[in-house]
Every structure is written in C-alpha cells, then in structure tokens.
Image (tube, rainbow, N blue to C red):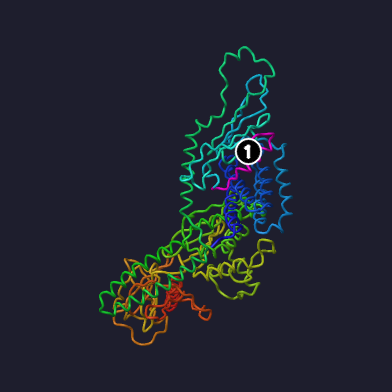
C-alpha cells in the first residue's frame, strides 16, 4: 500500500500549522521570548520547504513572503504587537486554506501580506534585537580588497531525512554573486557501510561578494547549529594599498569562524541529539482512526466469544478446557486493556484549540480575557475527544459573550478589567469532569424565567427551582440575548451541547454565584467501548453495572427489608445512603430472594444503594448502543451480550443516583406535610 504524498504533506502541515498558531499565541503573551520567535520561524521554514518539495507552489510562495515580512521581527527591527499577531494568525489561516483548496483561496493572500508588510515597515519603532545564532562577520585583512570568499560547509547527517535540499541551498548562494562550486567527497564512506538516508557530501564555494556573512546567515538559518561552516577571504587579489608597517610584524589574521576540524566536537554532539530525536520519532506511528475503531470492534467480539467459552468451561469437567479458557481470558483481558490504552488521548490536544477561539472572541467583543487551562494530561476516549469539540466551543463562547461583563461593568463591581475563563478536566471516579467557568455576573434566574415564559417554554404559574430554571437554557430555541449577532441570539448553541452530552451518556451540571461567575460541568464516562461490569440478577432478568461506579456491596439488613416502603436509608460507616429496590423500579413480579444484596454506586458526589436479588460476578462488558425505539429509557445506557448469547441491559448509574436522591427528597417532603 502506498499513500498519496500530497495527503501526507497535508497531514504534516496541519500539525505544523497548529504549532505555528500556538507559537503565535504564546508570542503575544511573551513578545521578547527568542525561543518562541525561533519556533515560529522553524514552522514557517518547514512548511515552505515541504510545500515546494510536494508541488504546493502557491503555499511555498505565500509562506516565503510571510517569512520575509516576519524576518524584521526576528532581527528586532519591529515589535511584536497584538495587531501583528492577529494578522499573522490570519496568514496562518490562509496557508491552511491554500493547502486544502488553493484555487479558491490564492487571491485572498495579497491583502494579508500587504497588511503584514505595513506593520513591519522600516519606520516602525525599533526594539531590542532578538538574540539569534549568527555567523560572526569576517573582517578582511587591512589594506586588501577582499571581494572573493571561500565558503566550506557540511550539512548535518540527517539533513536529507528532514527534507533539506542541498541544491536549493547552493542556488541561494549562487544568487549572491559569481561563484565556483566544488563537491567535497572526502567524507563519503564505502558502499558496504553507507547509510542511504545520510548526508556525506560537503561543498566548497568560491564566491565574489563584498561580505556574504549576513546573507549566509539567512541561507543556513535552521541548519547552522548542526553543521560545519567556515567562511574566509581569499587572498589572491593584489593589495590595493601597501600594508602599514605595524601590520607586517603581526601574525596572520585567523578567520572568525572555527575551521571544520575545530567544529567537529560540536557537530558530533548535535548529530547525537538529532539521532535521539529521530529514534524518538520512529517509536510513534500514524494509524487511521477507522482502523482503531475496527480493532476495537474485533476485540469486543473476542471478549464476547471468550465469555461464552468461560461459561462452557465452568459447566464442563474437562481440566484442559478450563486451562485454555483461563489462558484465553487472561490474553483477551490484556488485549482489551492495550486496545483501550491506544484509544485514550490526552484532553490537552482538545484544550489547545480553544486558545485561538478565546483570542478572537477577545478581539471581536473588545473584552480583555485571561484563558486558563488545567488537567491537560487527563485522558479520554478518542471518540469522546472528537465529539466534545462543538459543545465546548458553545460553552466557551457563552461564557465570554454572556458571562463576562464589559470593562465598565467590571470596574463598577470592583473586579479587575481582565476577565477569566477557566477550562479544566479531572477524574471523578468512573467519570471525567470537564468544567468551563468564568468570573462574570452569574446566571439571573428571574431573567431566564422571563425569557422562558415569553418563548412559551414554561407557564407563568409553573413552579421551578433555580436549578430547574438553569436547565432551561438547554431548551431548543432558548436565548436571553437581546439581539441576534454573529456570536449568539438564535438559541441553538446550548441545545447542541445538551444533545451531544446526552448522546455520550453524560450529564451537565450548572452552578452559579450571583456577581462571581458560573461553572458548567460536563460529567462523562471514560470510554464508550468496553468496560468491566458487575453482573446482577433482579427477578429473572440480568443486568450489568459499570464496575468503576461500584463502591461496595452489602447485605440488605432484615429490618430494612421488612420496613415500610417509605423512606429507605442504610447506615454505611456512619453515613446515611438512600437505596432503591430495583424490583420496584423495573416492575418485577414474583417474590424476592430471601437474602437480597445492596450494591452501593456513586456518580459525582452522590451515592445510592441498588437492592438486587443476586450478584452473579464480574464480566467484561462490550457496550452496544440501544436502538432509537429505546432511546427514551433513561435508566439504561446500553446493552451487552452475555456468554450464553442472552442480552443484558447496562444500568445508567448517574441517572439512578439522581433518581434515588430526588425520590428520597420527594418522600421527605410528603412526610413533612403529613406531620
């Protein structure tokens, strides 16, 4: 199988453009950071070189102009300003458009370049030069008209591997003036030891030029640290003036740049670093997401087949069959964990996308915003990562547009002018909690109720708690915006959030403090594929509970079993935990077992006990989504196939915990009124 080179370039260019965007955003916060300037240039230079190599000439031409304009920043001749970063981000977007569809985007580049050039014109304020590695200028001996220079260089050993084209470099040198180029072959090894990806040739260039030092600095901008380079004037020209007598007794002037032999130790160290970087890159492999999905499906089928074999072995007296079943169970469990680990992705890859969003919103709305992220190392299933992008975009836009006040309002309320939006992720038991919070004015229940009544979502006499009112913002078409803008007002965004999170078997929690801000928390399961489950029996039906949500199992006390069906609590280590009889919840007929068990499950901060007839044991549960006909069954989050081919429903512990706590509150209110 061979991949399309253009597709390979597009994939790598997207990663480089993401690095470029993050570098520009960081540069806005730290305009004097030389490392950030260099990282931006490396990304631009790599995109330009790769684009030319793969035939994306429009991309290479635009990035070359982009790089040339930005060169004044590198040399410290133009300051890094928010306006410059904004235009550079627009240029980055244009490069992305050229890569995806050059024909429709090529004409839009010149206005961007014109705006970029205008900001970096020579009459701009000069800032302190940014320190970059430069070739030290070589002074010609006094009295000599040294217009010819000998340039000798060897590229890093991995230069060809990373896309460097020596022919292009020699062409740039030849453009500087008349020259003679000679290849140096003394370092080429024998055929039996040669590395086909290595660079062994060196070059000697005799160039006629007043002083090529600065120009060569640009030619070898990203290669000097790992290469051997020497520049020295040729003394074959006749002296223009007789040298002063004082100069005759002085020793011959040495070139400012170390010769090849002296630079060898540095080159060796740089080569070792490059080899380590190449080795690290070789340990990773790009795999299409579709193949991972297919692998997970196959592992799921293997788990089901293994469960069936284990059940057959348990009913058999054949010792060999039992041994094979145990070995297969161990292997399938390891394969499941490995496959799940492959699918887990740090959520930081998602969080980094929103820095640009907040930057643009800050500019469009005229609000100063500090964007803080925490918990980037928290891992989540890749399917979750892909489907969370849109909901988080809507939540962040809502926090910036509706949550944060304007500068005047913030100063009036004693807050700093710069608002804060926080995006965080933490593990919470069997879930990941992702929170978007702001330090704005908070939610206004009265205004939400007024808008809900105007839009016919609720009636004027309908009684709702503040939490119930807050949930109305997720209703389709609901919006508190006074007018429709490019950012909000149509009541679509939060509806998208609700539907997407429901589809991921998660839930949304809202909390607000008037005048201090609002926090929206998304609680999501760690994975949507395979989980460890506890198999239980209620009546004649079998059900699975996600094992990560199970805290402990206890026996239902006889006193609680014979008590009234009123308020039901268990004392678990001096804490009262409400419990639900699943026979009543499911409407199961027949007499319960004599010794019922209680499975204590948790979701977030809540806990509830589930009374079951029997705990069968643990099993690997392959989650199958319910059909659309069963989408309204909130008690169940999916189904799984057991070893005997029967179907067992998977309990939605988050819903049962919420239902159990609400049920007990309702009973408490009824008992209070009766008293």
Q: Is residue 515 left or right of residue 112?
A: left
**Residue sitting farthest toward the top:** 245
Q: Residue 340: name its quadrant.
A: bottom left
- Relative image position of residue 573 (x, y in whole percent): 31, 66
- In the picture of the structure, the residue carrying the numbered disc 1 is 218
Residue 611 seen anywhere in this rendered image of the structure: no
Looking at the rendered image, the quarter that the C terminus falls into is: bottom left
Identify whether 415 is placed above or below 629: above
- Relative image position of residue 193 (x, y in whole percent): 46, 45
Q: Nearer the viewer, residue 56 or 232?
A: 232
**Residue sitting farthest toward the front:** 191
Q: Nearer the viewer, residue 253 or 277?
A: 253
Residue 243 seen anywhere in this rendered image of the structure: yes
Q: Residue 98: name its quadrant.
A: bottom right
- Relative image position of residue 107 (x, y in whole percent): 74, 54
Q: Nearer the viewer, residue 584 or 383?
A: 383
Q: Is residue 542 left or right of residue 104?
A: left
Label 1 crowding class (10 Å Cα cut-off): few <14, some 14-19, many 20+?
A: some
Q: Based on the picture, tell me whether residue 409 belongs to the magenta stretch.
A: no
Q: Residue 544: name its quadrant.
A: bottom left
Identify whether 496 is placed above or below 284: below
Figure disc tally: 1
Q: Is residue 626 left or right of residue 219?
A: left
Magenta region: which residues? 161-181
Q: Based on the picture, tell me whether residue 165 belongs to the magenta stretch.
A: yes
The residue under the point 72% across, 39% down is 121
The residue under the point 51% across, 33% down is 263
Q: Nearer the viewer, residue 491 or 163?
A: 163
Label 1: element kind: helix
Identify whether 414 is placed above or below 310: above
């Amino acid at each position: 199988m061979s991949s399309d080179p253009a597709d390979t370039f597009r994939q790598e260019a997207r990663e480089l453009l993401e690095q470029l965007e993050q570098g520009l955003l960081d540069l806005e916060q730290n305009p004097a950071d030389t490392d950030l300037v260099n990282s931006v240039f490396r990304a631009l230079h790599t995109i330009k070189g790769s684009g030319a190599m793969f035939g994306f000439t429009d991309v290479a031409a635009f990035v070359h102009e982009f790089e040339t304009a930005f060169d004044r920043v590198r040399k410290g001749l133009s300051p890094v300003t928010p306006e410059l970063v904004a235009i550079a981000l627009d240029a980055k977007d244009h490069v992305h458009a050229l890569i995806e569809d050059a024909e429709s985007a090529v004409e839009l580049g010149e206005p961007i370049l014109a705006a970029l050039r205008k900001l970096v014109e020579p009459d701009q304020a000069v800032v302190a030069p940014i320190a970059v590695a430069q070739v030290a200028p070589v002074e010609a001996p006094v009295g000599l008209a040294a217009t010819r220079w000998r340039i000798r260089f060897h590229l890093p050993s991995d230069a060809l591997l990373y896309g460097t084209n020596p022919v292009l470099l020699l062409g740039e040198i030849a453009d500087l003036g008349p020259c003679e180029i000679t290849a140096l072959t003394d370092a080429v090894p024998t055929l039996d030891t040669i590395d086909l990806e290595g660079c062994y040739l060196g070059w000697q260039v005799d160039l006629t030029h007043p002083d090529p030092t600065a120009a060569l600095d640009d030619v070898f901008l990203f290669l000097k640290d790992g290469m051997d380079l020497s520049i020295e004037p040729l003394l074959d020209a006749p002296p223009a003036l007789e040298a002063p007598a004082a100069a005759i007794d002085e020793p011959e002037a040495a070139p400012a740049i170390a010769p090849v032999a002296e630079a060898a130790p540095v080159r060796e160290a740089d080569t070792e670093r490059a080899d380590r970087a190449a080795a690290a890159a070789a340990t990773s492999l790009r795999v299409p997401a579709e193949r991972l999905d297919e692998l997970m499906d196959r592992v799921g089928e293997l788990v089901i087949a293994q469960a069936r074999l284990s059940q057959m072995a348990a009913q058999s007296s054949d010792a060999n069959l039992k041994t094979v079943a145990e070995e297969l169970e161990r292997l399938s469990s390891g394969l499941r964990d490995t496959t799940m680990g492959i699918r887990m992705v740090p959520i930081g890859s998602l969080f980094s996308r929103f820095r640009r969003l907040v930057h643009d919103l800050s500019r469009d709305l005229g609000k100063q915003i500090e964007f803080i992220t925490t918990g980037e190392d928290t891992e989540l299933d890749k399917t979750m990562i892909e489907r969370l992008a849109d909901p988080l975009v809507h939540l962040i836009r809502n926090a910036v547009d509706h949550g944060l006040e304007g500068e005047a309002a913030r100063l009036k309320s004693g807050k700093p002018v710069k608002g804060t939006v926080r995006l965080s992720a933490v593990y919470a038991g069997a879930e990941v909690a992702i929170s978007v919070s702001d330090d704005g004015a908070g939610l206004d229940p009265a205004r939400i109720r007024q808008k809900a009544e105007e839009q016919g979502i609720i009636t004027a006499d309908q009684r709702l708690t503040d939490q119930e009112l807050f949930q109305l913002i997720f209703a389709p078409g609901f919006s508190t915006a006074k007018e429709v803008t490019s950012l909000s007002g149509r009541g679509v965004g939060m509806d998208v959030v609700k539907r997407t999170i429901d589809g991921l078997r998660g839930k949304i929690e809202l909390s607000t403090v008037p005048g201090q801000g609002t926090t929206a928390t998304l609680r999501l399961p760690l994975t949507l594929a395979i989980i460890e489950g506890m198999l239980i029996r209620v009546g004649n039906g079998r059900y699975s509970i996600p094992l990560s949500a199970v805290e402990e199992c206890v026996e239902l006390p006889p006193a609680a079993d014979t008590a009234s069906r009123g308020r039901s609590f268990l004392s678990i280590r001096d804490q009262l935990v409400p419990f639900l009889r699943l026979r009543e919840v499911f409407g199961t007929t027949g007499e319960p077992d004599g010794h019922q068990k209680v499975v204590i499950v948790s979701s977030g901060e809540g806990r509830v006990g589930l009374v079951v007839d029997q705990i069968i044991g643990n099993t690997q549960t392959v989650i199958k989504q319910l059909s659309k006909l069963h989408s309204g069954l909130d008690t169940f989050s999916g189904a799984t196939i057991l070893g005997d081919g029967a179907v067992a429903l998977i309990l939605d512990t988050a819903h049962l915990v919420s239902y159990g706590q609400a049920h007990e509150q309702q009973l408490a209110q009824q008992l209070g009124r009766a008293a």
